[in-house]
Structures are given as structure tokens and as C-alpha cells.
Image: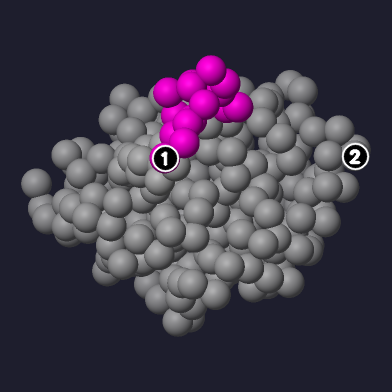
Amino acid sequence: MARELRMQNRAGIVPVKSKTLLEVSLDSVESAVAAQRGGAGQVELCANLPEGGTTPSAGLIATVRKAISIGLQVMVRPRGGDFCYSAQEFEVMKRDILMAKQLRADGIVLGILSRDGTVDVKRTRELVELSRPAGVTFHRAFDMTNNLSKALEAVIECGAARILTSGGEAAAEKAVDAIRALVEAAQSRIAVMVCGGVRENNARKIIEATGAREVHVGQRGVEAAVRSQMRHRNEKISLGSVPEQEYRHFVVSEERVKNLVRALATPT
């Protein structure tokens, strides 16, 4: 049976079976522009990437939206750590979704779990409905559930557009069988986006082995270091958690994104 999974971008709805969608996770306007120039189909905009990503500021969302025309997915995550949220944190998530929609985000990225490691269906469904017409990606909270097959059905029940998964492993290469099983079980009901250690040297192999047609790469997989322009430096103090990064930061490399796009398009 022909696959009818679809993706939404700024140009409208198009079939994904003809092309692999590449999404890049990032945290700056500069990186978003580089990802678009490199050929990415959409970006996942976050703050606090070392913590796995949290909700970006309104200013960042608005400025990125103005700077790029490809799909803009906005992370809605009130803090780092686990995905079992308090009532107050849930209220923060709802307000952040409304903010992202107002700022013309194309999609929302979120995930909520119950204490027993299952998908919190009731609250996830509420956020999915609140997000409409923007689609929802259930992020790697999915990989922290106690049963991936049951979690898939729960997320589908909630009405989300896709799941983001590495098959429950740190790297997708170690879980190609599990990811393929999810792709086959999903059929046309939900998209499966593969993540976890996807690089230009293994990207095509992973999509061929899993049957997935959407790929997510973290900024670390396509980034380049940018040295600070500061001439005066106080080496006695570090205001960040990683001292050696006080006078440098990281952005997406347009060339590395291009290399990944080429790798995805080249059969192994």
C-alpha cells in the first residue's frame, strides 16, 4: 500500500515519500539561516541545547521566523530533566504554545510522561488540541517510555503529527530493527522521525534500514565553533558551566548541512 505520510512546510502539504525531510535542532538565528541555506527542510528551535533543549524566548522565535522561510518547529519544554511535569509547569507549557502560535511557528515539539513511564495521554491530547492548526511532534520523551509500541499507539491517540525517536537507544544505528518496527506499525497514521547520532557517514544507511523518511540531526552533528571577538578577557572567572567555552560558541555549519543533505540523497 502506498505510503501517504505527509509533512507540512511553509509552501504547504507535500508527500514525503519522494524526499527525505531533514530537520536540524538549533538555538540561534545564525544557525537557522545556515540550516536553510544548507538545504534543511525545517528547524527545531530550542534554548539550552546542552540540557536537551528547552523553550526558546519570544524574541528568538520571532526573529528566526522573520529570517527563514522553511518550517519552524518550536520546542515547548519548561525545564531540563525528566518529562513528568507539575500543574504549574503544565500551565507554562500551555502559555508557551499560545506564544509560539502567535509568532507563526509551524509546529510544536513537546512530550509529557506519567510517573510510570507511559505517555500522559490526557495532558498530551490537551496540548495537541491547543496547538492546532500547528502540528505536534512528540519528542524523545518517547524514548524514555517503558514500552515503545504502546507509547506509539498512545501518541497516535493524542493526535500528534509525528514522533521523534532513536528507537530507545542512544544512537539510531543501534536500534534500526526497533525503528523499522515503529515505522511499519505507524503506517499512514503518524510520521516517524529518526534521530540519535545521525551523521553524513551513516544517514543514508539508517533511512534505508528503517524505512523512515524524516531525519533529525542535533546541532552538535552539524556545528562549527565560533571564537569570541572579545579582546579583553578575564581568565579568572567563568560564568558558564564549561570554562573552556567562555570565549567561544557554536553555530550550525551550512557546509556540514549540505554534506548531510547530499548523503541522504545518495544511495549506499
Q: From the image, tell me which residue sits under label 2.
A: 88
Q: Residue furthest front?
A: 232
Q: Residue at x 64, y 42 (%)?
A: 54
Q: Which residues are magenta?
A: 231-247
Front of the two marks 2 and 1: 1
Q: Residue at x 36, y 50 (%)?
A: 252
Looking at the image, tell me whether mark 2 or mark 1 is earlier in sequence order.
2
Decide: marks 2, 1 in contact (CB < 8 A)?
A: no
Magenta stretch contains residue 233: yes
Residue 3 in view (yes/no): no
Q: Tell me which amino acid carries mark 2.
A: Gln
Residue 49 is situated, as x and y percent measured from the top left of the image, at 53, 38
Magenta stretch contains residue 234: yes
Q: Using residue 192 as the reference point, say whether residue 175 is left or right of it.
A: left
Q: Tell me which amino acid carries mark 1.
A: Arg
Q: Using residue 231 as the reference point, say whether residue 53 is left or right of it.
A: right
Q: Residue furthest left?
A: 268
Q: Of 145 and 247, which appears nearest the observer?
A: 247
Report, in whole angstroms, how far the alpha carbon at label 2 lies from the one at label 1.
43 Å
Q: Is residue 244 above or below residue 256?
A: above
Residue 94 in view (yes/no): yes
Q: From the image, tell me which residue sits under label 1.
A: 231
Q: Using residue 259 as the reference point, say whether residue 5 is left or right of it.
A: right
Q: Of 2 and 73, which appears nearest the observer?
A: 73
Q: Residue at x 31, y 67 (%)?
A: 37
Residue 222 is situated, as x and y percent measured from the top left of the image, at 31, 45
Q: Residues within 10 Å of mark 1 (few under 14, many from 20)?
A: few
Q: Secondary structure at mark 1?
A: loop
Q: Residue at x 31, y 25 (%)?
A: 174
Q: Residues within 10 Å of mark 2 (few under 14, many from 20)?
A: few
